[in-house]
Every structure is written in C-alpha cells, then in structure tokens.
Image (spheres, rainbow, N blue to C red):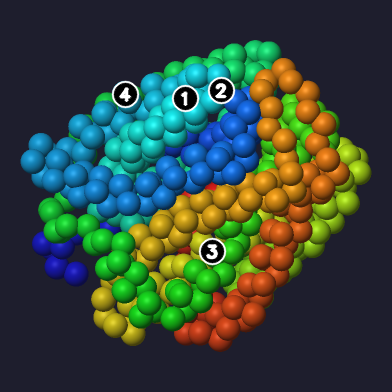
Amino acid sequence: MSAATPSWESVAPLPRGRLLRYSVGKVGSGLYNSIPGLLLMYYLTDTLAVTAAVAGIVVVIPKIWDMFCATLVGNLSDRDAIRHGRRTRLMLLGTVSLPVLFVLIFSGPSSGWQAITWVLLAYILAALAFEMFDIPYLALPAEMSASPQQRTRIMGWRIIATTVGVLMAGGVAPILVSSAGGGRRGYIVMALVMAVLMFVVMLICTLSSRWVTPLAHNGEQPTLLQTLRIARQNRPFVLLMGVYLPHAVGISMIQTAMAYVTAYLLGNAGLMALLFVALMGPSIFTVPLWTKLAHRVGKSRTFTIATVLYAVTCIAMFPAVLSGNLGAVVCIAVIMGIAFAGEQVMVFAMVPDTILADTERTGHNRAGAFAGVMQSLETTAAAIGAWTFSLILVATGFLSSTSGTSVEQTSLALNGIAYGYTLIPAVLLLATLPLIRKYSRSDAAAIGDRVDTEPFSEAVLTNAPV
C-alpha cells in the first residue's frame, strides 16, 4: 500500500457522542414504522367504525405510495446534498412535518367518510415526510467515515436505537392509549406523546449531523424497474427473495392481527404490551445463539431450523388463542420470538452472500440495486399482509364499532382472527422450505458458509411483528 493511500485502520474513530446523536434518529424511525402497523387498522375498525375492507385499503395505499416516493426523495436528497453541501436540509423538513402528521392520523373526525379520508391523506403525507428524514439519514453512514470498521460501529449503535424505538412502540404506545381512557382520546394522547419524542430525537440527529460532507454525485437513483432487471440476473438473490416475501407477508399479518387477538380472543386489549414483550424480549437476546449455530451447521440449515420452529409455534398458538389461555399464549410467544430472531438474522445474513456471489460472477458491485429491491419487497409484503388480514375479517363477518361500543363477534369472526394470526402465516412459512433447499445448493450459499458476512441491516428489529 502506498503512502498516498491510507489504510482503513488509520481513519480516526468516530466519537461516541457523535455516534449517539446520530443513532437516536432511529428511535423516531422505529416509533413511526411500528405504531401504525400495530394500532392503525384496529383504530379504524374499533374506534372509527370503519369496515374491515375499507380499513385495509386505508392502510395499504400509503405503503404502495411509499414504494414510489422513495426513489423521488432519494434523487432529491442527492441533488440537495450537492447543491448545499449537506443532506440535513431535507432531514429537517421531515423532522418538523412528520410528528405533526403523525398526530393528525389519530385526531381527525370521529366517523364516516370524512374520518376515512382524513386518515388516508394524513398517512400518505406522513409517509412522504418520513422518507424525507429517513432516506438522507440512511445515506449518512457512508459519508460519516471511509472506514468499514467505523461504519460497522455506526450500524451497531443504530441497531440499539432501533431496539429502543420498537420496544417503545409495542410496549409503551398501547399502554398510553389504555391509560388515557382508550377511544379517540387515548389515541390522541398516545400520538401526542410519541410525536414529541419523535421530534426531539430526530431534531438532535439532524442538527448534530450537519458536519457530514456528502460524497461525489453518482448520478440519478435507479428506478424500481431498473433495479428489478439487475436483481433478476442474480438467481440466488431471486430464490432468497422468493423465501423472504412470504415470510414478510406472514409477519405483517401477525403484526396487524395482534390488537384483535388481545381484544377479542384474550378479552383485554391492554394485554398487547405483555404479548409484545414476551415475543420481542427473547428474540433480542437469542440473536448471538442463532449466529453461533449458523457458524456450526451453516446458514441455510439454520434458516430451515428457524423457519420450521417458527411455523410450529404459529400452529401451536392457534388452540392457545382460541382457548383464551394467557399463560399458554405467553409461553408460545416466547418460543415464537426465539424462532423469529433466527429466521430474520439468517435471511439478512444471507443477502450479502448473494451480493458477493454476484460480484464474483460479474465483476460489478451492485449492492445498491439489490438493497432497493429488498426495500420494495418489504413494503410490498407489509401491504399484502395487512390487506390479506382485512380480507379475512371481511370474509368472516367481523363487525366494526366505535369506541365505547361493545360488539359481540361471531365464532366465525373469532376463528378468522385466529387463522390470520397463526395458521395462515404458518402455511406461508412452510411453503418456502423447498426454495430454501434450492438456495442451499447455490454458489451464494457456499460463499456464506465459507466467509463470515455481517447481517445486511437492522431489519431484525424493524420487521418485528409488533
């Protein structure tokens, strides 16, 4: 190595204070990503008396819109960074507007088409505001340090912040709703408290990231169609995404169904926080154990084990939730969380293997294109899962209601909730086993068992079924 080319080790480490101020932005992202998936459909059907079919549309449309506005905001972020020398202008706009729009989602008219239109428009605008903050935010690590080791440190801090955001969304937001009396008032109080927290952490992150100098402009962001064409050329990646999409759809269904399970099958909506902690607590602490198992038996085999365990626990959860046995539900949720951690860690550890295999075959590093496809699949899966669960509610005759109104659901509707929370996700998981086996014979799987690639992102937490 010449003297003119510094080694990565010579790059000065980032101060902990700077890492902390950057990473807290992910607390706000974790809150926004998780709370609507956890509570919004239930808020629509059981507080605003919106039918399940319409509620599904209201939840899905902003997710579809989010797929298309991401590229637009990405290009805008790049142009703004080159013109003004920093990315934080767009982040500041998202920081100011997202908390306000988040509160508006839960503070519109009390019923009717006015309420439906209000929530839909507020959610669409909130999705755009979120991208204005999140896309520049995600671009910052590559510009904060040239050292791969330092970027790994950044990712570690970001994962911790994501954990805090997700835990607060699943463990605190439902309690805030209940403690404020439930109904529209409870949701407004919850939204106000969480919006203030979002604003504070996002503002700290934005103002403390103004020192970051953007990299040289590399042209327009590729369109979704362009990234799909690139991804199709990588067969192991296509196989892995064929596995990931049904998994993510199942997780989205579990996420959407959780409020209905606690309210109608366990008889107490306030139990949602307990069920969430039972699920997420073990999943966080067992990640290292799954990593060790992968080192011993290989990633593909570990992925298969986690997938089967996840499916089996989903099946076991079916009679438990129908019986209303809280102890059994919590115990099974703990095991489900352990399986969930393994399934998520493995899929996101295998994605870099497919990218490395593609680089060895083609001589080109096209990681950005594959990341774009995966991000689009995540959004698509969230939309499909929420819409599918809403269709189950419609098909089984679920009755919507306003807050404070008691509605007795039929046994068919209660069974539909249980099916959407347990058996249908289990079928989706088991259906992917042949694809996992095909992937295990690929060159990417061989690379994954030969080298120790790191997980692709903090999606272990951002995709949590909360």
Task: Provide the secondary structure element on which disc 1 rests.
Answer: helix
Write down the residue under mark 1. 114
The quadrant in which residue 28 appears is top left
| Percent coordinates x, y for residue 23 in the rendering | 40, 36
| Residue located at (56% from left, 86% from top) | 441
The crowd level at tag 3 (other Cα within 10 Å; few <14, some 14-19, many 20+) is: many
Q: Earlier along the polypeptide chain: callout 2 or callout 4?
A: 4
Give the CA separation, mark 3 to mark 1.
34 Å
The residue carrying mark 3 is 245
Q: Which of disc 3 and disc 4 is earlier in sequence?
A: 4
- Asked if residue 20 can be seen in this view, the reply is no
Measured along the vertical axis of the image, is residue 450 above or below residue 241?
Answer: below
- Report x, y in % for residue 105: 47, 26
Q: Are marks 3 and 2 in contact (CB under 8 Å)?
A: no
* Residue in view at x 14 percent, y 41 percent: 80
Q: CA distance from mark 4 to mark 1?
A: 25 Å
Quadrant of the rendering where the C terminus is positioned: top right
Q: Of marks 3 and 1, which one's residue comes earlier in the chain?
A: 1
Query: Which residue type does callout 2 highlight?
Result: Ser
Q: Secondary structure at mark 4?
A: helix
Give the residue drawn at x 49%, y 28%. 113
- Name, please, the residue furthest toward the front: 113
Disc 3 marks which amino acid? Leu
* 169 relative position to 212: left or right: right
Are dots 2 and 1 in contact, CB under 8 Å? yes
Placement of the N terminus among the 4 image quadrants: bottom left
Closer to viewer: mark 4 or mark 1: 1
- State the residue position of label 2: 111
Query: Residue at label 4?
Result: 96
